[in-house]
Amino acid sequence: MSKAVNIDWKTIGFKYIKTDLRYVSRWKDGRWDAGELVEDNMLRISEGSTALHYGQACFEGLKAYRAKEGGIHLFRPDQNAKRMQESCRRVLMPEMPVEKFIDACVQVVKANRHYVPPYGTGATLYLRPFMIGVGDNIGVAPAPEYLFCVFCIPVGAYFKGGMIPVNFTVSDHDRAAPHGTGAVKVGGNYASSLLPHGLAAKRGFADCIYLDPATHTKIEEVGAANFFGITGSNRFVTPQSPSILPSITKYSLMQVAKDYLGMDVEERDVYVDRLDEFTEAGACGTAAVITPIGGIEYKGKLHVFYSEKEVGPVTRKLYDTLCGIQLGDIRAPEGWIFEVKE
Ligand SMILES: *Cc1c(COP(=O)(O)O)cnc(C)c1O
């Protein structure tokens, strides 16, 4: 298992590569089977699978980190497991028990341990658990069978030349309905984001900002990441809404802001025409931890927060602290680091 892999950790980026083994468990007749690691990265499923027609599917994303002392850490995998259960409840899929979800992630990390990038490269092993409705079916109804899978890919440091702010534009499209599926990580949400993202990218923006679907006055999400702003009085503010996907990174940053940096934190409405209340802003999620927001274009005007060129000091401190916790360099709150015993 200590097979060396020939990967340049500095240039891998974020793209699919086939690693050695992935985990598959099948649900049928009311129960999950034992699950197994397989070499084949192809799924053979019925043409009638609900995942293909009706989007009965959900996914998660989390990372494994190589610590300085050599161990491998997962960051709060129980939170991903619980969030996947929420997704499953919303689209009538069977829940995967938390212990089995974590065990599947651990098995995949161990089986592909030579793909876990070394400490200090900024690269990590990204895990992609997902569940899909499969089996012979045609009507709009829950599937007769389900697959739960976990695969992994090594991914590069998100910011190669250090953190750089990027600009976003406010979209006229909605990613979610007021009482729809915005708060769960189900497949359809992302198909509908491809066009708004494409339109923003064509105009030179990193991605788009989605407003609340009911009134179009409040910030909800930044592409597929959550929004936060830092006020002049050093408060960490993030929007509250039933159609925002609850980012584990965001809730971790809130705790870091409060307990490590002594800041006040607030979840509340963030009005898009009141951006001047923030001295810094960022987008947060597993992929980049934090993407500093240079400016937001709204109604033809670009509102710049701290700078379009430099990262603000609070954003940097939040980023350094959370990354230090994930790597094991900074003492983590109870239960945040799950050690993979090799
Ligand atoms: C996954 C996701 C996030 C980030 O969640 P993390 O748990 O921090 O990775 C934010 N918004 C959307 C829409 C997402 O799909």
Image (cartoon, rainbow, N blue to C red):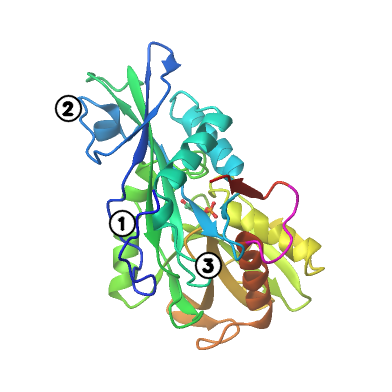
Q: Is residue 289 above or below residue 11?
A: above
Pointers 3 and 1 in contact (C-beta within 8 Å):
no
Say which element carries label 2. loop
Label 3, residues with CA under 10 Å away: few <14, some 14-19, many ≥20? some
Instruction: Tell me the residue that label 3 is attached to.
Output: 119
Q: Name which quarter of the figure residue 131 lies in.
A: top left
Which mark is on residue 47?
2
Q: Name which quarter of the figure residue 33 lies in.
A: top left
Provide the residue span drawn in magenta.
Answer: 328-334
Q: Is residue 257 above or below residue 28?
A: below
Residue 326, x across and y down, in percent: 61, 60
Residue 314, x across and y down, in percent: 69, 77
- Give the CA distance from mark 3 to mark 2: 43 Å
Q: Name which quarter of the figure residue 186 lies in.
A: top left
Say which element carries label 1. helix
Whether the magenta-drawn stretch holds residue 222 is answered as: no
Label 2, residues with CA under 10 Å away: few <14, some 14-19, many ≥20? some
Q: Which of label 3 and label 2 is nearer to you?
A: 3
Q: Sequence order check: which comes first, mark 2 or mark 1?
A: 2
Q: Amino acid at mark 2?
A: Glu
Instruction: Tell me the residue that label 1 is attached to.
Output: 194
Label 1, residues with CA under 10 Å away: few <14, some 14-19, many ≥20? few
Taking depth in this image into account, of 89 and 303 the one nearest to the observer is 89
Point 71% across, 66% down: residue: 236
Q: Amino acid at mark 3?
A: Tyr
Q: Which of label 3 and label 1 is nearer to you?
A: 3
Q: Sequence order check: which comes first, mark 3 or mark 2?
A: 2
- Give the CA distance from mark 2 to mark 1: 24 Å
Q: Is residue 313 visible?
A: yes
Pointers 3 and 2 in contact (C-beta within 8 Å):
no
The residue at label 1 has a CB less than 8 Å from ligand 1: no
- Give the CA distance from mark 3 to mark 1: 34 Å
